[in-house]
Amino acid sequence: MEKAFSEADREAVYRAIHERRDMRHFVSDPIAPPVMQRLIDAALHAPSVGFMQPWRILRITRAHIRAQLRDAVERERLLTADALGERRDSFMRLKVEGLRDCAEVLVMALMDGREDYVFGRRTLPEMDLASVACAIQNMWLAARAEGLGMGWVSLFDPQEVAALLNMPSGARPVAILCVGHVERYYAAPMLETERWAKRRSIEECVFENEWPSAEE
């Protein structure tokens, strides 16, 4: 079996990684069912701690539930703005979701009964959440390869959304995903373009052997 991808395939993988964006602007054209199925399949093939596969995906097809999710996000957006102090006005100018216009809304959740899974989680129980994040990233990269945009919305009260979607005790929503067609991809991450933050350098993120001291 050939170990390395062909040069074209390899470049395609890195292109998807570097061109992936957290999209907030969509056009409402529907996504073809086979394409949507491929995105879901990509998520379900993510790595997971102890092969527990802790992800559960709720596809929101009812307009009134989508509207209720948007209301929940708006309430948390205002609370987040108040918590940001002097950055409140800058935050309020940002577009933080595309729930009104995107073709598909998915809620990614952690399953119930996770306490029964010990493999890989005895000292790091949060690895179930890391596994769900891998599933989201798989879908994000697949969406970019399909010419679609995806946005991750995390501004909501988990208990409120869990109740709205009738989740069992122990299950927890971790992301509202907006998926759909876009007119264009952002040339750079929107929060970077808006000067909210900037990408960190390799030197800031990669250390050798031990954490550097503050004096270095």
Image (cartoon, grey):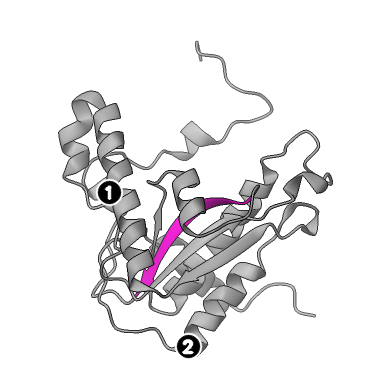
- The residue identified by callout 1 is 74
- Left or right? Give the position of 60 relative to 193: right
Residue 124: give x, y in percent of width and height. Answer: 73, 36
Q: Earlier in the sequence, mark 2 or mark 1?
A: 2
Q: Nearer the viewer, residue 98 or 184?
A: 98
Camera-near label (2 vs 1) is 1
Residue 212 falls within the magenta-colored stretch = no
Q: Which amino acid does label 2 sit on?
A: Pro
**Can you say which quadrant of the picture contains the N terminus?**
bottom right
Q: Residue at x 43, y 38 (%)?
A: 201
Quadrant in which residue 70 is drawn: bottom left
Q: In this view, does 156 lie above or below 30?
A: above
Q: What residue type is labelled 1?
A: Glu
Residue 177 falls within the magenta-colored stretch = yes
Q: Is mark 1 on a helix, strand or loop?
A: helix
Q: Are marks 2 and 1 in contact (CB under 8 Å)?
A: no
Main SS class of the magenta portion in the image: strand
Q: Can residue 85 be seen in this view?
A: yes
Quadrant in which residue 51 is drawn: bottom right
Q: Which residue lies furthest to the top in this view?
A: 215
Q: Which residue is drawn at 41% across and 38% down?
A: 200
- The residue identified by callout 2 is 33
Q: In this view, does 130 lie above or below 214?
A: below
Q: Which residue is drawn at 29% across and 62% down?
A: 98
In the image, the segment drawn in magenta is 171-180
Q: Which of 22 and 65 is in front in this view?
A: 65
Residue 214: give x, y in percent of width and height. Answer: 50, 13
- Left or right? Give the position of 138 relative to 60: right
